[in-house]
Image (cartoon, rainbow, N blue to C red):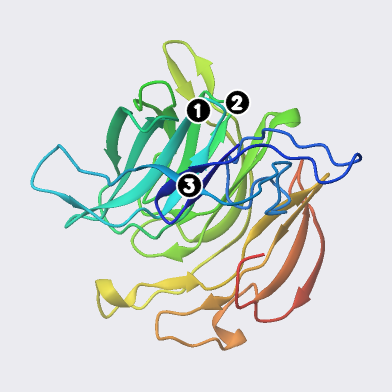
Amino acid sequence: VYFIILGFIIRTPIVNSSPSLECTNESWNTYGHDERRTFASGGCISGPLTTLWRYVPSPTQGPYYSSPVKQVLALDDSLLVRYSVNPSEKTGFDRLSLSGNLLWSKYYGINYDRDHWPTIIDTSTILFNEDRLYAIDFSNGLYIASDPPFDTWGEIVVDLPNSRFYTVNDIYFDGPKTYVAAYTLPYRSGNSFVMSLIWKKLNQGTTNQTGFVGKVSDILGGGLVRDGDTLFYAPRYRSHNGSYNIEDFTYHSGIYAFNSANGAQKWSVSTLPSTRI
């Protein structure tokens, strides 16, 4: 079993602490491990831990330098290291073998990296929503599809049995307003791949006509979780002037439950979330 701790990769033997405990090798391919955000896997560890190798991203394109590693996703055969490429704040991905060898390195986006986690689908495709909604070929890091507008950022939850995924835009800057939405997983259409919008809800944003920097509404805290046929979303809306006044919004901060298939709202509770779910 491999574990990633503060940029180090650690290997430890699998140990059964009781006859009923089954230790398994599981991919950690999204924020919180799975669509329910359990933050738990079937792996087992016992000490002491030892350092096998250490990896620091080193951008090779342009006059760039890397931020510290922000996230690492772990599969059976490789790791996906995610960081920011500065000074332009692009999103950087490095795929590594389990022995720490670089397999490929790519940068994406225009600017303004907001630290959202990528998700790997079936060990074949990376989805991430950072300055734009992207689908990337996991085998080589090449772009295969995107949602056209720039300036979207948010979490992603995958629903493999129904060939869907869910995402949000959590800041209205110079593109789409804030929303929660469902898309098809990337599929081939002719010579290209597409991701088709299924439904979109809570589409809103406030506008200040005095200047570009005033045209900002964002969502603090919040989070996106799927449990069965229900998608939960917890936005905390803030207007361009920093206000949380409910008069500024059509939809209010709180916890929302949607039918994951069609977006029909099941219920909502008014509150001010302060962290991700």
Whether residue 149 is visible, yes or no, is: no
- The Cα atoms of the two marked residues, 1 and 2, are separated by 7 Å
Q: Secondary structure at mark 3?
A: strand
Q: Secondary structure at mark 1?
A: strand
Q: Which residue is mark 1?
A: 125
Mark 2 and mark 3 in contact (Cβ < 8 Å)?
no
Tell me what residue is drawn at x 66 percent, y 46 percent: 45
Tell me what residue is drawn at x 65 percent, y 81 percent: 272
Vertical side of 268 occupied by 45: above or below: above
The quarter of the image holding the C terminus is bottom right
The kind of residue on which mark 1 rests is: Thr
Tell me what residue is drawn at x 61 percent, y 66 percent: 276
Q: Secondary structure at mark 2?
A: loop
Mark number, residue 16: none
Mark 2 and mark 1 in contact (Cβ < 8 Å)?
yes
Point out residue 193 in the picture as x, y percentages from the top left corner. 47, 21
Q: Which residue is mark 2?
A: 122
Residue 74 or residue 89, whichever sits in front:
74
Report the number of discs: 3
Vertical side of 248 occupied by 176: above or below: above
Residue 167 or residue 59, whichever sits in front:
59
Q: Residue 80 sits in which quadrant?
A: top left
Mark number, residue 50: 3
The kind of residue on which mark 2 rests is: Asp
